[in-house]
Image (cartoon, rainbow, N blue to C red):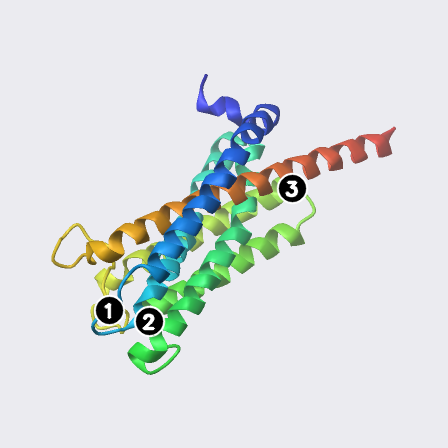
């Protein structure tokens, strides 16, 4: 069976209905284990003290805020090329989840930044690009809500998603492009000298997996809701014609 078979709404509903319970349980379990391990069973940092433990929320949320937009981009391109309605609805479903992840990343970053930088906010390249990404998220959701024709809304939001991807990339790589910013370098690195200690790395990895699973769970759940709403609108329109 090809992956494109799941673009059929009926097959998507059957498949997602089967995997959702397991994904939900696994994501909650990983969240509990990762956050408990990170906040209660890791030592304080020798420089940042207990403040460093906010990393277990901030880093996974920031990663998913960017990757959520990447998922929306892929789904939007699929819509523009193949006009699979499930892909457009999946992109729509991911946007509010992405907004939440972005807000969590910004809030935890501000809490972390206050004792480290002496301020909650600075117009650092990465912070600024993240704020612009949030504006694009909100604009994306607003555009979906403002247009009644669902196919036209999918077309326009897909174009907006492609434009906003520039800032998603900047949010990801701003630390590497602008070294003069306040924001620290990448937390995770292939270089063992710059990568965080294994004491923090292993619980952080569990938290990242938890956020990924949570994102997939929420997107599947919201996509199923949008599929049902679209079907209900189609039935209502058919009855009105009769």
Direction bottom: furthest residue: 118
Residue, x 21% and y 58% (percent of image)? 196
Q: Which mark is residue 94?
A: none
Residue, x 86% and y 34% (percent of image)? 240
**Taking the image as drawn, is residue 180 in sight?**
yes
Marks 2 and 1 close (CB-CB < 8 Å): yes
**Taking the image as drawn, is residue 70 in sight?**
no
From what the image shows, is residue 11 above or below residue 33? Answer: above
From what the image shows, is residue 144 above or below residue 185? Answer: above
Alpha carbon distance from label 2 to label 1: 8 Å
Mark 3 / mark 2, whichever is N-terminal? 2
Q: Position of residue 220 (x, y in %)?
A: 54, 38
Q: Position of residue 72 (x, y in %)?
A: 47, 45
Residue carrying label 2 = 51
Mark 1 / mark 3, whichever is N-terminal? 1
| Left or right side of 233 for 192 | left
- Total labels: the figure holds 3
Direction right: furthest residue: 242
Quadrant location of the C terminus in the rendered image: top right
Residue carrying label 1 = 45
Q: Position of residue 129 (x, y in %)?
A: 38, 64
Pick whichever, 35 or 71, lies toward us. 35
Q: Position of residue 199 (x, y in %)?
A: 23, 56
Alpha carbon distance from label 3 to label 2: 45 Å
Question: Quadrant location of residue 110?
Answer: bottom left
| Left or right side of 69 for 140 | right
Mark 2 / mark 1, whichever is N-terminal? 1
From what the image shows, is residue 163 above or below residue 221? Answer: below
Residue carrying label 3 = 150
Q: Secondary structure at mark 2?
A: helix
Q: Residues within 10 Å of mark 2 (few under 14, many from 20)?
A: some
């Amino acid at each position: 069976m090809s992956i494109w078979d799941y673009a059929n709404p009926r097959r998507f509903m059957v498949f997602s209905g089967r995997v959702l319970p397991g994904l939900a349980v696994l994501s909650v379990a990983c969240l509990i284990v990762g956050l408990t391990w990170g906040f209660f069973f890791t030592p304080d940092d020798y420089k940042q003290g207990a403040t460093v433990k906010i990393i277990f929320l901030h880093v996974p949320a920031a990663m998913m805020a960017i990757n959520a937009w990447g998922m929306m981009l892929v789904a939007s391109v699929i819509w523009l090329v193949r006009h699979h309605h499930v892909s457009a609805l999946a992109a729509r479903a991911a946007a509010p989840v992405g907004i939440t992840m972005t807000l969590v990343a910004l809030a935890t970053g501000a809490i972390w930044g206050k004792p480290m930088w002496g301020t909650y906010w600075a117009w650092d390249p990465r912070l600024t690009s993240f704020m612009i990404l949030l504006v694009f998220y909100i604009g994306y959701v607003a555009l979906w809500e403002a247009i009644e024709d669902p196919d036209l809304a999918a077309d326009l939001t897909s174009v907006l998603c492609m434009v906003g991807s520039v800032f998603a990339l900047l949010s990801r790589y701003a630390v590497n492009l602008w070294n003069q910013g306040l924001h620290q370098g990448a937390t995770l690195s292939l270089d063992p000298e710059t990568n965080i200690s294994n004491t923090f790395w292993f619980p952080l990895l569990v938290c990242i997996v938890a956020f990924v699973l949570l994102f997939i769970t929420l997107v599947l759940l919201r996509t199923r809701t949008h599929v049902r709403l679209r079907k209900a609108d189609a039935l209502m329109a058919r009855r009105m014609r009769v």
